[in-house]
Amino acid sequence: MSRLLFTNVQIFEGTESQCRPGEVLLNGNRISAVAAPGESLPREGVEEIIDGQGATLMPGLVNPHCHFTYSNAVSLADINALPVEENLLITLRNARTYLDYGFTAVIGVASAKPRLEVVVRNAVNKGEFPGPRILASTPEYTVSGGVGDDSRLDLFVPSIGIVCDGVEEFRKSVRQLIREGVDIVKFNNSGDSFTFGRMPGDINPMTEDEVRTICETTLNVGKRLAAHAHTDSGVRQCVQYGVELINHATFASDATIEALAKVADRHWVTPAIAARYNTTYEAQAWGITTEIAESIGNKRELEAGCVTMQKMHRAGIRVLPFGDYGFAWIPIGTDCRDLEHMVNLFDMKPWEALRAATAYGGEAWVGNSGEKLGRIAPGYLADILLIDGDPLADLSLLQDQRRIVAVMKDGQFHRRFSGRAERATGKVAA
Ligand SMILES: [Zn+2]
């Protein structure tokens, strides 16, 4: 096991409100010791010492609502129309982009093609291509007329999701996708403004039997669940049937928030608020004016979602950033804009947003496996960033690849530290 020591760094531990000066010792792919301020760690047996020059050392970012098979297109239909070969290349490129931007772990929640996330996860795990730690998802499961099913009676359109109706169809398909190797089964028990009025976000088109069947079939073989749940009934189903990853949760009622808060240690909420905020205010160039966003219900989802997330945060529910990046106006790589949204829209403090992006994200990624990810503490996996500057003072640093001056996943450098000044002036390529 190789031993590597970071010295002269300001440490953001993942759960603390301030950075503190210190040193961090790695043993292979794990953190073995962290020095308290003013102390230094023993140098014996250390093979490499990296002087961080005062940079901030923090856990790698975790994206718990990741669409790394998406092509930064204008619509789901455009992504769906990609042949699988092109879509595979895009997915491999996105995996690298995420790692370039400091995301050392991602949770897929809706593969654009059935096996894309699975095969890219496997290739990254073998070291064939660069990328974060990946949990691979099914395509999103939907019902006829739900999000992703754009067919008409007189015109069949292949869905980006898997369209099933009734418990037998869901049970069979979920089992088949688990056979193909997914980690996450994702289903849509809510509509969305992106259906342009056909199935609004406050409608839940799935029956109780269908939801129960998806969840029981998945949990029965030890896999994990994510749900596109804008609706109050959808969020309640997540609590009732063990859906750990709750996407959106926009219209959760006070009673549902209270019920969720009682089991808050079992769930993570990812509102994906950029798909509301940026779509409402910043997508004009792609034909979605604020008026259109309002008419399809997107602005309403934004406003309701902000109120709900403030309540959930106050109630101690883990609200996480990132999600739904992969469209033209929220392209992959700009995901850390979400940290500003959390401060501006959810009343979070910058350190709380960063805790959600690291420590909470790490908890979401490992689930109940017993693994440790997302903090700078002994025993945790060595997923580590060095940032040129203080991200707690300026969260936008994390949107600038030149300020992310080192990226390490599993004890291995993806981007090796070569000093602060060179990076800040952009002389060194990724
Ligand atoms: Zn999503």
Image (cartoon, helix red, strand yellow):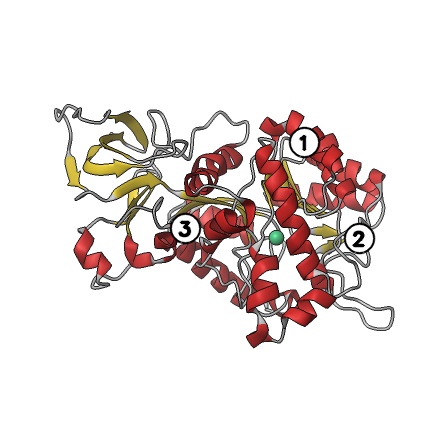
Disc 2: CA contacts within 10 A as few (<14), some (14-19) or many (>=20):
many
Q: Secondary structure at mark 2?
A: loop
Secondary structure of the residue carrying tag 1 is helix
Q: Secondary structure at mark 3?
A: loop
Name the spot of residue 365 as percent of width and height, x first. Answer: 51, 37
Q: Amino acid at mark 1?
A: Leu
| Residue 313 in picture, x, y percent from top left | 57, 37
Residue position for label 2:
143
Tell me the residue at 56%/35% (across/down): 318
Which is more N-terminal, label 3 or label 2?
A: 3
Mark 3 crowd level (few <14, some 14–19, many ≥20, 10 Å Cα): many
Q: Which residue is mark 1?
A: 260
Q: CA distance from mark 1 to mark 3?
A: 33 Å
Quadrant of the frame with the C terminus? bottom left
Q: Earlier in the sequence, mark 2 or mark 1?
A: 2
Above or below 426: residue 416: above
Residue occupying image coordinates x 17% and y 56%: 421
Residue 372 appears in view: yes
- Ligand 1 within 8 Å of the CB at mark 2: no
CB of residue at label 3: within 8 Å of ligand 1?
Answer: no
Indicate which label's residue lies in the foreground, 2 or 1: 1
Q: Which mark is residue 131?
A: 3
Q: In which quarter of the view is residue 159 placed?
A: bottom right
The alpha-carbon separation of the residues under discs 2 and 1 comes to 26 Å
Q: Is residue 193 above or below residue 345?
A: below
User: Mark 2 is on which residue type?
Assistant: Val
**Residue 185, horizontal then vertical, whole percent:** 65, 43
Where's residue 234, x and y in %?
75, 42
Q: Residues within 10 Å of mark 1 (few under 14, many from 20)?
A: many
